[in-house]
Image (spheres, rainbow, N blue to C red):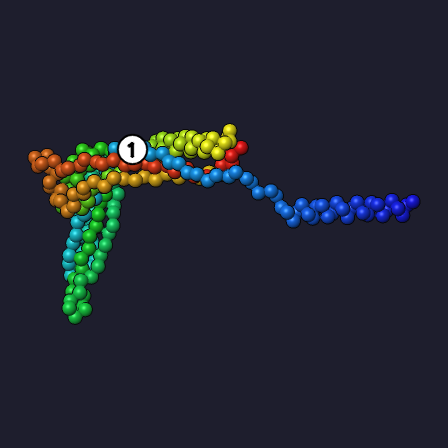
């Protein structure tokens, strides 16, 4: 009797082991009715951030003297502009600083040339224009427009909200189209991008053109598109 019970238990153990092995070999059931889709949301806004780049260059026979002259010009310009600088409205920072040798046809160094930049940035276009006019030793190298960080963050939230709503509407529409009543979100990716619209740039214009009795420098900003994209998979049910 004991031998029969032992054999029965052993047989049951083998059967259970076989079922477990079979289930493991088959693995979990693959999800069904999965649909991949994407949607986007776009918000347009006037560019509110101006970046004006001033620059100057120097030439000389000695590298150290050219470098010192550039440093003095930059320091003088920064000291002048700092008088009216205000966080957010107008901020300043130094830009690129370069120094390179000049060569003769024989490949020998016969002098040095260099350049330096000062960038004025902010929300107050008029203040930046007026400050640049007080630095006559530099020229306006470029003017660029964009979105301030605060405005960009607001627009990103709006664009993301639109993209998510569009994603949900599209998912519900697809579910109904295939004869399902609902869907379940499985995974999703969200990203945003700032797509600035190009506007004309005024290059190499003397900052003396910014004085009050001269024609105003064109500073009309363009518009930027903030686009949010949502992509992912949903399971129809």
Count the marks.
1
Q: Where is residue 53 drawn, in percent x and y?
A: 21, 44
Residue linked to disc 1? 44
Q: Quadrant of residue 210?
A: top left
Q: Nearer the viewer, residue 232 or 178?
A: 178
Q: Nearer the viewer, residue 107 or 59?
A: 107
Residue at far bottom of view: 106
What's the residue at 89%, 48% (across, down)?
3
Q: Where is residue 218 drawn, in percent x and y?
A: 15, 37
Q: Where is residue 220 drawn, in percent x and y?
A: 18, 35
The N terminus, quarter of image: top right
Residue 138 in sight:
no
Residue at far left of view: 213
Q: Quadrant of residue 103?
A: bottom left
Within 10 Å of disc 1 (Cα), the crowding (few <14, some 14-19, many 20+) is: some
What's the residue at 18%, 68% (across, down)?
108
Q: Is 209 left, or right, of 198 in this rendering?
A: left
Q: Quadrant of residue 225?
A: top left
What's the residue at 90%, 45% (across, down)?
2
Q: Is 28 left, or right, of 33 in this rendering?
A: right
Residue 209 in sight:
yes
What's the residue at 18%, 33% (across, down)?
126
* 67 shown above or below 143: below
Q: Nearer the viewer, residue 62 or 31?
A: 31
* 211 shown above or below 67: above
Q: Is 195 left, or right, of 108 in this rendering?
A: right
- Secondary structure under the numbered disc 1 in the rendered image: strand
């Amino acid at each position: 009797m004991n031998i029969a019970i032992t054999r029965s238990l052993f047989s049951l153990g083998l059967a259970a082991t076989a079922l477990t092995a079979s289930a493991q070999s088959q693995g979990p059931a693959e999800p069904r009715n999965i649909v991949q889709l994407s949607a986007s949301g776009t918000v347009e806004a006037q560019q509110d951030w101006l970046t004006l780049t001033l620059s100057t260059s120097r030439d000389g026979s000695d590298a150290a003297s050219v470098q010192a002259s550039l440093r003095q010009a930059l320091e003088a310009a920064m000291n002048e502009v700092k008088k009216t600088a205000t966080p957010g409205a107008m901020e300043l920072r130094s830009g690129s600083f370069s120094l390179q040798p000049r060569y003769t046809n024989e490949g020998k160094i016969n002098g040095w040339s260099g350049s330096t930049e000062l960038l004025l940035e902010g929300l107050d276009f008029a203040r930046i224009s007026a400050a640049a006019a007080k630095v006559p030793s530099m020229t306006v190298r470029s003017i660029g427009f964009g979105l301030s960080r605060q405005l960009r963050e607001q627009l990103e939230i709006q664009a993301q909200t639109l993209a998510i709503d569009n994603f949900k509407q599209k998912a519900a529409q697809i579910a109904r189209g295939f004869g399902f009543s609902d869907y379940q979100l499985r995974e999703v990716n969200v990203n945003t991008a700032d797509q600035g619209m190009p506007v004309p740039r005024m290059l190499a214009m003397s900052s003396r053109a910014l004085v009050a009795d001269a024609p105003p420098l064109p500073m009309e900003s363009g518009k930027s598109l903030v686009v949010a994209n949502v992509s992912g998979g949903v399971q129809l049910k």
